[in-house]
Amino acid sequence: MKASAIEFRLRMPINIAIVVIGFYAPWTGAWGLGRRIPLLEWLPLQLSRLDLLSFAVATRAVIAVAALIAAIGAVLRIWGSAWLGPATVLHPQMKAGAVLADGPYRYVRNPLYLGVWCVIAALGFLMPPTGALFTMVLLTVFLLRLTLGEEAFLATQIGEPYQAYLRAVPRFIPRLREAPPPTGRRPHWFRAVLSELTPIGVFLALAFLTWSYDYRVMAKAIVVGFGIGLVGRALVLGSRQEPSPSQ
């Protein structure tokens, strides 16, 4: 069930491939499964048909939910990257150091994967319904495999201190009470923001461009944001490398 080292190294291209297939949803044309209408329009239509909300109210509510999910994803990515260190986050190989129990890692072990899940879930609102379902199921399985692979690696490399951390902090569902004491590590906020420009761009596109319902403009904005995010990551990787604690 756990991911291999190759999957970890290729985690970004794999995530991108999952998203691209979700947007394209080739089965809607080849086999006639589902409709190509974006989830952002399909969901309000279903809510109005069930007489739960009027179409106008449902539309605004769905857009707000999509933007909120994107915002949560961006915050988790920046917060987690700031404390773990962007160079460690972007490293192609699993790295082990001292156990990190600062920032979001005091409450949940995998804030970065939760952030990825939220950002792509927000993008799912721009996909056909079946594409969004495909994307989220496949993404959830892949992120779980990555998590299990990292846990096995860190448990082998660090041993009992990491085992104690596993017992103290939940894997995916944050727990605010009984959090372990912080280790005193300093966050790298500027570098974290620079390395996470893509989720910021997704949030901005969903929060400010969805109201126009011009999906071409939204798609272009997201692609441009992704390109800017790659430049930001390149700048981070080209700068000084910080120490690498474990997650």
Image (tube, rainbow, N blue to C red):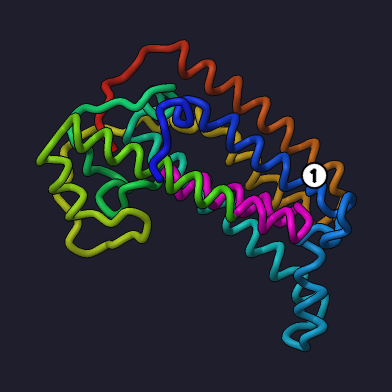
Q: Residues within 10 Å of mark 1 (few under 14, many from 20)?
A: some
Q: Position of residue 4 (x, y in %)?
A: 41, 32
Task: Report whether residue 87 is seen.
Answer: yes
Q: Quadrant of residue 227?
A: top right
Residue 15's place in the image compared with 180, above or below, is above
In magenta, the rendered stretch is: 112-136
Q: How many marks?
A: 1
Closer to the camera in the image, 44 or 102: 44
Q: Kindly identify the residue that appears in the image at 80 percent across and 67 percent down.
A: 42
Q: Which residue is mark 1?
A: 24
Amino acid beneath label 1: Tyr
Q: Secondary structure at mark 1?
A: helix
**Extreme residue in the left direction:** 160
Q: Kindly identify the residue that appears in the image at 26 percent across and 21 percent down.
A: 243
Q: Quadrant of the N terminus?
A: top left
Q: Specify the principal SS of the magenta part.
A: helix
Residue 118's place in the image compared with 3, above or below, is below
Q: Kindly identify the residue that appears in the image at 30 percent across and 25 percent down.
A: 95
Q: Is residue 83 left or right of residue 26?
A: left
Q: Quadrant of residue 36?
A: bottom right
